[in-house]
Image (cartoon, rainbow, N blue to C red):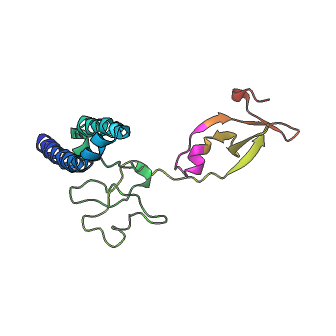
Amino acid sequence: MERRINSRIDTFMHALKQKIAAQFEEVRQKHAQNVAANPQLQDMQRDYTQVMNFIYESDKLKLSKDDFAKRKRVKNAVPVFDRCHAKRANGEQCTRRKKEGCLCCGTHTKGTPHGMFDELDAPITNVKVETWVQDIKGIMYHIDSQGNVYDPEDIVANKMNPNVIAKYVKHDTGTYSIPTFVIQ
């Protein structure tokens, strides 16, 4: 398919260049007598040649397999503890994210024709940790009450399990420091 399309593009471009050249030649023929009579117009002949060279020497458009490749869809992985508890027709657990305050996704809240997925493991509870922004030596960090310092990109993106990048220490004076970052 790629070769066939490339040949059609080449054929079209060749025909287009020939039409432009024919039109350009017709205009040149009209003005040829004026150019011969007036030596100051000799530059027009040189310009004509340059334009024709430009038209015929322009690069061809070539399409590659990448131009025809379908873009792959990016799938977001849902954590196991946040997946819908309904069974799909093949007996596996539904892979959609469950609705807040419900055990199922939007589709399965209306009904679970294949039943609910029984977890053999102990259910993993989702714990919400309150974080706040604290100025530590002039830099703003997202911290919690357990001494964790979180990755700000994860907090802003509202990720389910943000990365802990360090531990902070609160001093008796009320100031904070992060020993692993050597910020005293």
User: Is 178 on the left or on the right of 117, as rendered?
Assistant: right
Residue 155 seen by the camera? yes
Report x, y in % for residue 140.
72, 43
Residue that extends furthest to the front in the rendered view of this protein: 37
Residue drawn at x 32%, y 49% as measured from the top left = 73
| Closer to the camera in the image, 150 or 109 | 150
Report x, y in % for residue 184.
80, 29
Residue that extends furthest to the right in the rendered view of this protein: 173
- Disc tally is 0
Which contiguous range is marked in magenta?
Answer: 153-164
| Closer to the camera in the image, 52 or 8 | 52
Decide whether residue 157 is among the magenta residues.
yes
Report x, y in % for residue 52.
26, 39
User: Is 103 on the left or on the right of 116, as rendered?
Assistant: right
Residue drawn at x 37%, y 59% as measured from the top left = 84
137, above or below 24, in the image: above
| Closer to the camera in the image, 24 or 64 | 24
Which quarter shows the N terminus?
A: top left
Decide whether residue 49 is among the magenta residues.
no
* Quadrant housing residue 64: top left
Residue 69 seen by the camera? no
Report x, y in % for residue 138.
78, 39
